[in-house]
Amino acid sequence: MRRVAIIGVGQTKFRTRRDDATHEELTFEGVSRTLEDAGLSISQIDSFIYGTMDPFDGVNSPDKWCVGGAGAVGKPFIKISTGGTTGLTAGIAAYHQVASGAFDISMAVCTQRVGVGDDAQSILNTCVCPIYERDAGAGAISIGAHQASRHMFKYGSTDYQRALISVDAHKNALNNPNAHIQVDVNPEDVLNSRMIEWPLRLLECCPRSDGACAVIFASEEAAKKLCPHPAWVWGEASILDSYWWGERPDLADWDVLSLAGRRLFKMAGISNPLKEIDVAELYAPFTSQILLELEALGFCGHGEAGPLIEKGVFKMDGEMAVTPSGGVLCTNPIGATGLVRLTEAVLQVTGKAGQHQVPGAEVALAHAWGGTMQLHALMIVGKHKR
Amino acid sequence: MAEKKEEFIKVKANWNIPFTHSAGKCASHFFQEMREKKRILGIRCPKCQRVMLPPRSFCERCFVATTDWVPVKDEGVVESVSINYMEYTGMPKPPYAIAFIRLDGSDSNLMHFVGGVDLSDWKKAKDLVKIGTRVKAVWKEEREGRMTDIMYFKPVSAK
Amino acid sequence: MERIGIVGVGMTPISSGKKEVFYDASFEAARRALADARLDRGDLDQVVAAGYDLACGRTITNMYTTPAAGGYLKDETRISDDGMFALAQAWMRMGAGFATTMCLAYGVSSEAPMPLVSNLMFEPLFHRPFGMHSGNTAALQASVYCAESRTKPEDAALVVVKNLRQGSKNPRSRRVKPVTAKQVEKSPMAAWPLRELDLPNYSDGTVGLILAPEHEAKRISPCPVWIEGIGWSIDSYYLGERNLAELKSLSEAARRAYLMAGIKDPAREIQVFEVAEQSSYYEIMAYEALGLISPGGGAKLIRSGATEISGRIPVNPSGGAMASDPVAATGLFRVAEAVLQLQGRAGKVQVKGAQCALASVSSGPAGQASCVVILRRD
Ligand SMILES: [Zn+2]
């Protein structure tokens, strides 16, 4: 297995709708930005991974349409679709293409237009089993709401703590030019916003975003020639739980994420995540999920995330910065979101995050979850080789 | 001369694909029992002995086929809950509460509505359908063999 | 990179569907594959699944099938395309360190109208309004190819006769009856020049393959089948910008696979071809794309009988997609059939003494994307 570097990242500005471009053109825009960042031409890319969640764009397998936009005509091209994890599993797939020795340079490309669907929630409801569960009208928000209600019940986390999570995310997004929602909010704004699905309020839920993102992976040899300061992949992991939410031992504890986290940290040689990791780009379309993810990944003990958030431990200038980009709460192009997490992690460890740079960041974690809180994907990148 | 504002045309489209989903052998039996006998059946894994709801033809943990049907009560406890206040295309009219319910005799939680109480104000509703509430199925008179043969689960304490 | 061997094959019967759920079928195929390899779920390091969401009417279908394939709490990924592309990604994941792998594809065609599902593969702006779907796109391609190569409907009918005859003998295929050339030429016109019988037989079916790195494969199976070469490629989406008379992505995929496997003369070095044919004409075009004969000569090959099971380069002894087309699994079924051939387990459709086999698939309009794999036994 070969060591792998990330030598280029890029993303479009995310918006509710991009009426000035088609899906294919949006792909082209994302890929162009990444090529520009890497200083490469499209002919230097050996292989492509394309990630998207089909139903949102109203096209069955939009990858077939967007081959030209990705610059992949005549090249090896594989389509990944794994739910909310899609972006990151696409990145992991491109990583495996290089790590295996099959290709020297592989690009993961993700485009998603959530804004095209007149109602994203009705599309998300099609994730739910039509035989047993779809009639109950559950969608993605239900997941965050159930986790929130259960976490409050079991650990006593509060509406106020979740409001602080929203406030921090929105403040960070103001410094990220690509973030979708850029408004300054205070805890009262969050607590007074409209009840969507109890206990979650409007400002605790992500927007639906249009945009594209691409990341270039390269072998150590290729990276040496092409990129003076790449990010290095330290480890990755994906995991699958049961589809059935009713089988989770407790919705307050994301135990399957703990399991994946332990595998990841073993591969990356991390023993104390809070000390050794500088930035965590967590996938949390709902405030409640930051609590569960911090606890599951061992950044703190169960039930401790809420109080630590009140203390500011996970702010930009805290012990470990959580989603300095503003995260999924401010930008969610679903099938591309996981790759945006990775892109942001890479920007941090290569010192290219600009206004939202965490000073001295050297190790960053990217995370995504998908399905019925069923799938997780993780990757750790570092400034130095491991 | 003022420049003409660029116009971006939008094309309306929607996916209207009819689907006929096979329920399969296992769910078919489960639904028939609901339709004909107002009875909820779990299925037991012969290896780990879990009683699974909704029933499936195999246990993914032990990777063996499941065979033994086990009647469970149409009554149980709310394990987690959310209450919906937004309306979405093709989805139930709000307000509605979705809960995971541990029916007596089952080892997993079944998704269903909790109803029969006033959900219009979340400040009151969250105490009526909270975690730990005991609920009982309210069956439809006309049943067709699907999950919605139970209208909702109603808190036992509610009149 | 260590060689990767196929050490277990599991297939569900291929059917017209409507009775079982696709995740139960996944469980069945996975169990059969594990039993074939004499392994159990605990031995699996990862699951790589393939399938289309829209055909199943559910978003993220791997949520259901991957646990059924043995993936509970395991590392996994899912390819939203035919199972052969999942085989390619599984092969690379194993090159990056994963050990015993379940590669599984679920083909579901019975729950929704497939022409409509394939119509939605076209974007809504330029192509979709014209009622394009996989059948009439294949027809468009056939008409261009015929004009260029002077291939006749009689030639295409020979492919149908050959594949349905083989399909009728193969118990693993969907139950089909053999047909005569006359019957093909009299079957209803679907989209000129394609008649109903020129098109694949939409089916349901699931297939699982167990893969292992060489050092393990030799201990697991008495006769592992090695992935010696694999290649895949994609062509432009815009049909108007492609030369429809050639299967460009298929020839590019084959070029890559041959290079890796060190194949110089495929017609001599490979004894069995399992080609997922998108139409009868497609199979004739594939002869050319795979380098079995020079461009324009495909019809000569079918007329000569060379691609019959008794011929010198048997193509689709299993019956191919004409007999059964569980969309999204069709390609991986071709791989499974090729493995059985190399292991001498193909039964009534066995090609004698095969040492090297090729399996291929195309997906997308008019063979836009393709994958080719070269398999060998020791
Ligand atoms: Zn069990």
Image (tube, helix red, strand yellow):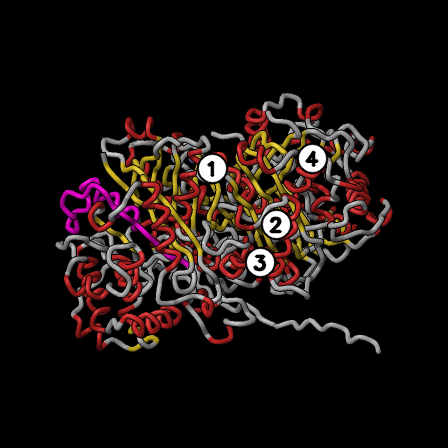
Q: CA distance from mark 4 to mark 1?
A: 36 Å
Residue at which label 4 appears: A350
Residue at which label 3 appears: B151
**Left or right: where A287 falls relative to C298:** right
- Amino acid carrying label 3: it is Met
Residue at which label 2 appears: A336
Q: Disc 4 on helix, strand or loop?
A: loop
- Asked if both marks, 2 and 4, belong to the same chain, the answer given is yes
Crowding near the residue tagged with mark 2, few <14, some 14–19, many ≥20 C-alpha atoms within 10 Å:
many
- Amino acid carrying label 4: it is Thr
Q: Disc 3 on helix, strand or loop?
A: strand
Q: CA distance from mark 2 to mark 4?
A: 21 Å
Which of the marked residues, 2 or 4, is nearer the chain's N terminus?
2
- Asked if both marks, 4 and 3, belong to the same chain, the answer given is no
- Asked if both marks, 2 and 3, belong to the same chain, the answer given is no
Of badges 4 and 1, nearer the viewer stands 4
Query: Is residue C359 a member of the stretch shown in magenta?
Result: yes
Tell me what residue is drawn at x 26 percent, y 43 percent: C339
